Image (cartoon, coloured by chain):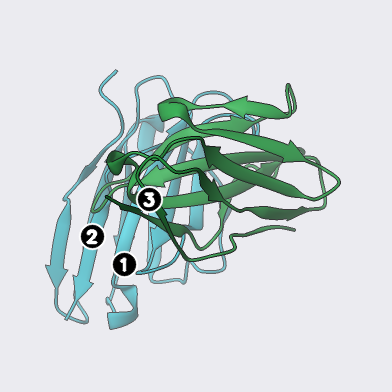
Chain colours: A cyan, B green
């Protein structure tokens, strides 16, 4: 069990560029979540998958954001036409099973800075 | 709808003193409650969770928390603080019936005074 991994750990981009982040969950975990954390705040939910199906998206997830989880394994989060307000830490988590009582295991995050 | 409120964005305690971090929740369904710790530039690590099995929950690193339904609270305690406890602590809630995303509080930064 190698834990949840995220790539890259840091990304600096210019406003208007597109960026893509990758998350590799713990193997066999069927649930995968994306959260966003801004400075001094707690993480905020963005979206989650059960296997390859995207089950819920937050209103925070504008149409510039898209997430996929092909084949129910790794997931990607793409931000198109980045804005300075997108600067944040993007966290991925995975869990085994369904239900709110299941522990979500977090990756180290991808820190995005939009200049 | 679910939410958590963490009272005190910054808490300082002396090494060896009691640690008390406060969390109150609001939930329209029976809640599951979590405490996570975050060290600088790292992800979140689970300290402990309440899933209705027992109201007093023991976690890692000597932390524990008690679920009090009448007070809608889930405060985190540790009898004796250690320098390595300095970090950001987040309380979070999910719930039964499809409420499976974590809703986090704004966090409490714990500083340990030598």
Bin the neighbour count of mark 2 within 10 Å (Cα to Cα): few under 14, some 14-19, many 20 and up.
many
Disc nearer the start of the sequence (2/1): 1
Is any part of residue A51 visible from this angle? Answer: no
Relative placement, left or right, of A10 versus B24 is left
Query: Both on one chain, marks 2 and 1?
Result: yes
Task: Tell me which chain the residue with mark 1 is part of.
Answer: A
Task: Tell me which chain the residue with mark 3 is part of.
Answer: B
Relative placement, left or right, of A56 versus A36 is right
With respect to residue B48, does A93 lie above or below?
A: below
Bin the neighbour count of mark 3 within 10 Å (Cα to Cα): few under 14, some 14-19, many 20 and up.
some
Task: Tell me which chain the residue with mark 2 is part of.
Answer: A
**Dots 3 and 1: beta carbons under 8 Å?**
no
Residue A16: % across, % down: 22, 81
Measure the C-alpha gap from mark 2 to mark 1.
6 Å
Give the residue number, with chain letter if any, for mark 1.
Answer: A88
Give the residue number, with chain letter if any, for mark 3.
Answer: B14
Give the residue furthest to the right: B70
Measure the C-alpha gap from mark 3 to mark 1.
32 Å
Q: Which mark is residue A111?
A: 2
For numbered disc 1, what is the local secondary structure? Answer: strand
């Amino acid at each position: 069990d190698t834990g949840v991994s995220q790539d890259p750990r840091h990304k600096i981009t210019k406003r208007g560029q597109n960026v893509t982040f990758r998350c590799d969950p713990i193997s066999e975990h069927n649930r995968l979540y994306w959260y966003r954390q801004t400075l001094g705040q707690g993480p905020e939910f963005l979206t989650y998958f059960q296997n390859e199906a995207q089950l819920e998206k937050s209103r925070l997830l504008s149409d510039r954001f898209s997430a996929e989880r092909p084949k129910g394994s790794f997931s990607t989060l793409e931000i198109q036409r980045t804005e300075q307000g997108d600067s944040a830490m993007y966290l991925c988590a995975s869990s085994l099973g369904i239900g709110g009582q299941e522990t979500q295991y977090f990756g180290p995050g991808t820190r995005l800075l939009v200049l | 709808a679910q939410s958590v409120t963490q009272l005190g964005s910054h808490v300082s305690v002396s090494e060896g003193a009691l640690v008390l971090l406060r969390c109150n929740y609001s939930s329209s369904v029976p809640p599951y409650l979590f405490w996570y710790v975050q060290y600088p530039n790292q992800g979140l690590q689970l300290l402990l969770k309440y899933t209705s099995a027992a109201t007093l929950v023991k976690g890692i690193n000597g932390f524990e928390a008690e679920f009090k339904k009448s007070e809608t609270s889930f405060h985190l305690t540790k009898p004796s603080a250690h320098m390595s406890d300095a970090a950001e602590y987040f309380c979070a809630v999910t719930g039964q019936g499809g409420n499976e995303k974590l809703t986090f509080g704004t966090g409490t930064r714990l500083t340990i005074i030598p």
